[in-house]
Amino acid sequence: MPHSDLLPSLLYKINKNQLALEAAIMELSNWVESRGSADVADNLRGALDTIDRNEEFIELTLAVPMAPE
């Protein structure tokens, strides 16, 4: 398999890892907030906004090289 064929799969896996980290951080922010640290939870959620804003673009862009020819 040529190395160029691996790149779309690698990017897909990295994106999936990023989404899993997003979910884990959201769980942590909920836990932190339930223990009275609303400011920290808000900061965590603010950082997650970047992932949310970029998710659709990443998914659409990854679909192009992964589409069957």
Image (cartoon, rainbow, N blue to C red):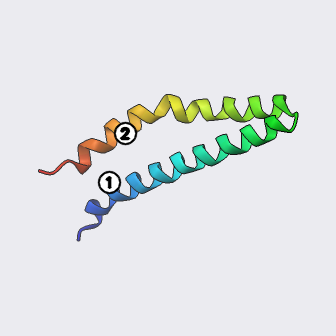
> Which three-letter amino acid code belongs to the residue tagged 2?
Glu
Residue placed furthest toward the left: 69
Dot 2 crowding, Cα within 10 Å, few <14, some 14–19, many 20+: few
Name the residue tied to disc 1: 8
Total numbered labels: 2
The quadrant holding residue 47 is: top right
Horizontal and vertical percent for residue 64? 24, 42
Residue marked by disc 2? 59
Residue at position x 40%, y 52% in the image: 11
Instruction: State the image coordinates of residue 48 (x, y, percent, origin top left).
Output: 62, 35
In the depicted structure, whether residue 3 falls above or below residue 14: below
Could you tell me the amino acid type at mark 1? Pro
**Residue 56 on image: x %, y %:** 40, 32
Q: Is residue 13 above or below residue 29?
A: below
Q: Residue at x 52, y 32 (%)?
A: 52
Q: Nearer the viewer, residue 7 or 45?
A: 45
38 relative to 63 in the view: left or right: right
Q: In the image, which is nearer the foreground, mark 1 or mark 2? A: 2
Q: Quadrant of residue 62?
A: top left
Label 1 to label 2: alpha-carbon separation: 11 Å
Residues marked 1 and 2 touching at CB (< 8 Å) = no
Badge 1 density bin: few <14, some 14–19, many ≥20, Cα 10 Å: some
Labels 1 and 2: the sequence-earlier one? 1
